[in-house]
Image: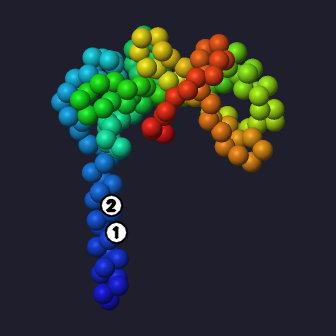
Amino acid sequence: MKKILLGSLILLAGSTMFAQSRDRQAPTRVQKTFQHDYPDARDPHWNNTNGQWHADFNDGSRYDRGEMTAHYDQQGRHIDSHIPYDRNDVPAPVVNRTERRYPGARDYEYTRIERGNNRNFYRVKLRHQGRYRTLYMDDNGRDKQYSDRHP
């Protein structure tokens, strides 16, 4: 009986911690910056991990970028935004360079990362010869270095 009670308490504590990190309200300064950056955002869902605030939402702007995630630091500064892309929407140099470099790769995932000031690029995740790889490239297929601290 003690083991069941102890197990239940651990599960309750774990689920409470998880609930606190998902669907919380971001601080006012973060929300204000987000609203300025994405005034047409629909239904943002906030969570906080690794000291950063993340808003998952649908972009309703004239650009209509669809589902995306915006990342902010604790002071409300925009870090970057991740937008999943279909292969057909990725610039040809990015696709061609990746396919030449990793022939026979599969499970491609393309994400456009927007950092402001036209410093945008693509993250390409793929599986090649049983190993998962992540690459970063600009619109011209040139390698970029980036320390991506979120999924």
Residue found at x 78% / y 44%: 129
Q: Please state if 2 lies on the left or on the right of 145 as rendered.
A: left
Residue found at x 74% / y 48%: 130
Q: Residue at the far bottom: name it.
A: 1
Residue found at x 49% / y 33%: 147
| Residue kind at label 1, given as amino acid type | Leu
**Residue 117 x/y as whole percent:** 42, 11
Q: CA distance from mark 2 to mark 1?
A: 6 Å
Q: Quadrant of the N terminus?
A: bottom left
Q: Is residue 90 above or below residue 71?
A: above
Element type at mark 1: helix
- Name the disc covering residue 61, or none: none
**Residue 81 x/y as whole percent:** 43, 25
| Residue kind at label 2, given as amino acid type | Ser
Element type at mark 2: helix
Asked if the residue at tag 1 contacts the one at tag 2, i.e. Cβ–Cβ closer than 8 Å, the answer is: yes
Residue 43 visible in image: no
Q: Please state if 11 lies on the left or on the right of 86 as rendered.
A: left
**Residue 19 x/y as whole percent:** 30, 53
Residue pointed to by mark 2: 15
Residue pointed to by mark 1: 11
Give the crowd class for mark 2: few <14, some 14-19, many >=20 residues within 10 Å: few
**Residue 109 x/y as whole percent:** 62, 33
Residue 68 sits in quarter: top left
